[in-house]
């Protein structure tokens, strides 16, 4: 007996490896392009200049991280030559749980390829000096801090101001200014923009939840379903209706990222059933399997599903269990 379902794994790998191009991607790309264009132009004029930042906010599981990751790959693959001749690079730092500024410096060093253990009485100033040194040495001009709200949560107003000041100092660092991308939940906006000087250096891009009353959002969901179904070699044309997409949005707590996850799970169900098409019953099975519910008990098959489910409660279930 194998511990790997190779058929399911192949479908997941194929669909997870795909990247769906949301319209919001263009807004994000434009914000990053504005930031890097200013950086490139001013880096060629003087050694002492001021970098800027992009703030990306929106609810959890909305797709912020995957969208920024995609832009980071595109940025690095572009092999942009800075005025000093080096290739410009962007790196990512993921914050998990409450972090202090010194700890963030250590995480940043690791993202820059510094894998040595930080020992002894090294203070945060020394660590961040090393961050600037290694960023310059490796041509890193931009750092993405993902889930950045964690460094502010449960901090006093004084400490929050200090952190904002530290981020501002990275943008204004005289030896090697660093562009920054901050991403996180909506709460992050008040933390980053809470200081006027830092706020003036930041452009905000918001990723909203699905609005099931907006025809454009329902059309986008339809496009997602068709794109992933086609990639899996499946037909989904019978589910191209406003009612189905409203049910799908509800089942995914109005989060774009969860829609993609559930579509992938459903494609696995359909493939394993040797079906040529994805049906509402396949979505129902993927949903009930995900949450260990009784067969048929889902927003896809119950006529008055809103009487039996609550969108926020469904989201809590999504976050309590591991994703694919």
Image (tube, rainbow, N blue to C red):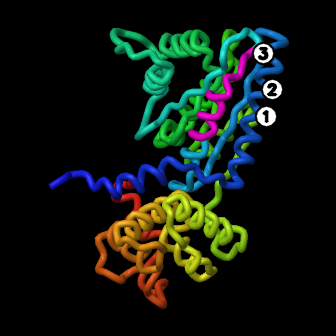
Q: Residue beneath label 3, please?
A: 43
- Position of residue 138 relative to residue 92, above or below, is above
- Direction from residue 40 to residue 222 in the image, left or right: left
Magenta segment: 69-82
Whether residue 148 is visible here, answered yes or no, is yes
In the rendered structure, does residue 297 fall within the stretch colored magenta?
no
- Position of residue 89 relative to residue 225, above or below, is above
Residue 59 position in % (x across, y down):
56, 56
Residue 86 position in % (x across, y down):
67, 12
Residue depicted at 78% across the width and 15% down the height: 43
Instruction: Tell me which secondary structure the magenta stretch mostly adopts.
Output: helix
Distance between mark 3 and mark 1 Cα atoms = 14 Å
Residue depicted at 44% across the width and 15% down the height: 114
Residue 162 position in % (x across, y down):
58, 28
Residue 304 position in % (x across, y down):
48, 90
Residue depicted at 62% across the width and 80% down the height: 241
Query: Do the residues under discs 2 and 3 have CB atoms within 8 angstroms?
Result: no
- Label 3 environment density (alpha carbons within 10 Å; few <14, some 14–19, many ≥20): some
Which of the pair 235/60 is nearer the observer?
235
- Position of residue 153 relative to residue 216, above or below, is above
Distance between mark 2 and mark 1 Cα atoms = 6 Å
Q: Residue beneath label 2, please?
A: 38
Q: Quadrant of the C terminus?
A: bottom left
Which of the pair 79/167 is nearer the observer?
79
Distance between mark 2 and mark 3 Cα atoms = 8 Å
- Label 2 environment density (alpha carbons within 10 Å; few <14, some 14–19, many ≥20): few
Element carrying mark 1: helix
Q: Residue beneath label 1, please?
A: 34
Which of the pair 124/50 is nearer the observer?
50
């Amino acid at each position: 007996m194998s511990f790997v379902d190779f058929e399911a794994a192949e479908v997941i790998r194929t669909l997870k490896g795909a990247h769906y191009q949301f319209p919001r991607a263009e807004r994000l790309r434009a914000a990053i392009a504005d930031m890097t264009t200013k950086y490139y132009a001013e880096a060629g004029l003087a050694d002492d200049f001021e970098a800027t930042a992009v703030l990306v906010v929106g609810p959890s599981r909305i797709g912020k991280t995957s969208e920024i990751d995609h832009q980071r790959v595109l940025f690095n693959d572009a092999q942009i030559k800075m005025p000093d001749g080096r290739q410009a690079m962007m790196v990512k730092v993921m914050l998990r749980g409450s972090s202090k500024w010194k700890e963030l410096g250590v995480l940043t060093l690791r993202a820059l390829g510094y894998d040595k253990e930080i020992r002894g009485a090294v203070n945060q100033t020394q660590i961040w000096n090393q961050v600037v040194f290694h960023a310059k040495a490796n041509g890193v001009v931009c750092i993405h801090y993902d889930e950045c709200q964690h460094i502010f949560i449960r901090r006093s107003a004084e400490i929050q101001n200090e952190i904002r000041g530290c981020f501002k100092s990275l943008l204004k660092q005289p030896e090697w200014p660093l562009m920054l991308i901050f991403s996180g939940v909506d709460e992050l906006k008040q933390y980053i923009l809470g200081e006027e000087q830092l706020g003036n250096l930041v452009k905000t891009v918001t990723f909203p939840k699905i609005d099931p009353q907006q025809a454009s959002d329902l059309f986008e969901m339809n496009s997602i379903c068709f794109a992933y179904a086609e990639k899996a070699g499946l037909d989904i044309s019978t589910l191209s209706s406003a009612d189905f997409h409203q049910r799908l949005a509800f089942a995914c707590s109005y989060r774009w990222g969860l829609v993609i996850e559930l579509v992938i799970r459903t494609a696995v169900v359909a493939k394993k059933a040797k079906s040529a098409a994805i049906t509402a019953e396949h979505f129902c099975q993927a949903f009930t399997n995900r949450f260990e519910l009784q067969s048929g008990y889902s927003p896809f098959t119950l006529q008055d599903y809103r009487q039996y489910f609550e969108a926020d409660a469904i989201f809590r279930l999504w976050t309590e269990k591991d994703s694919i």
